[in-house]
Image (spheres, rainbow, N blue to C red):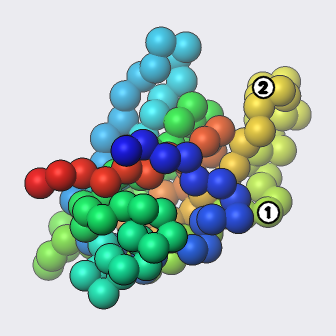
Amino acid sequence: MLRQIRDNELDKLPLHDAEIHSLNTAYADDGKINLSIRIKINSEEIDTLLNKFEINESILELTFISCWQIISDIVGCNASREVLLDWSVLQTSSLIDDLKNKGFANEAELKHYLLSLSGGTTLSIIAEKLFISGINK
């Protein structure tokens, strides 16, 4: 089930120490990019996920819809899969301000998501929406 994550739900997502399995991008028909991150959540977090989001799978896909900008610093050589260390939504963003000052995204409600991973990888994502879905193995 694909479910949109609203602002007031972001801090309730049990994503700390989630293992990163894949990053995928796809162009939408409107020319924007969607970014999907497949993760495996910590087994101790399944109850939280089920109770708050009605998802009972441990493999999840986070899908950022209509990305206006994705900045990544991906470390390609680690001893094991990276895990999510920190996840935040910036309340003020110079990247969003720059887009709007250039005349882009004036009608869009953009969010700036910042993800830090255990091996040093960082992802900075400017997107319109975020969805989550459980993946059956």
Neighbor class of circle 2 (other Cα within 10 Å; few <14, some 14-19, many 20+) is few
Q: Is residue 22 above or below residue 44?
A: above
Amino acid type at circle 2 is: Phe
Give the image location of residue 56, x and y in percent.
30, 65
| 1 or 2: mark nearer the eye | 1
Q: Is residue 72 above or below residue 75?
A: above
Q: Nearer the viewer, residue 130 or 44?
A: 44
Mark identifier at residue 83: none
Q: Circle 2 sits on which residue?
A: 104
Give the image location of residue 41, x and y in percent.
30, 72
Task: Specify the quadrant that holds the C terminus.
Answer: bottom left
Residue in the picture at 47% in, 12% down: 29
Give the image location of residue 25, x and y in percent.
36, 35
For the question of whether residue 113 can be seen, the reply is yes
Q: Is residue 5 above or below residue 98?
A: below
Give the image location of residue 117, x and y in percent.
39, 72
Amino acid type at circle 1 is: Gln
Instruction: Name the outermost residue toward the top.
Output: 29
Residue 80 position by quadrant = bottom left
Q: Circle 1 sits on which residue?
A: 91
Instruction: Name the outermost residue toward the right.
Output: 101
Q: Is residue 45 left or right of residue 57?
A: right
Q: Are marks 1 and 2 in contact (CB under 8 Å)?
A: no
Residue 126 position by quadrant = top right
Residue in the picture at 82% in, 60% down: 92
Q: Is residue 101 left or right of residue 76?
A: right
Where disc 2 sits, the SS reads loop
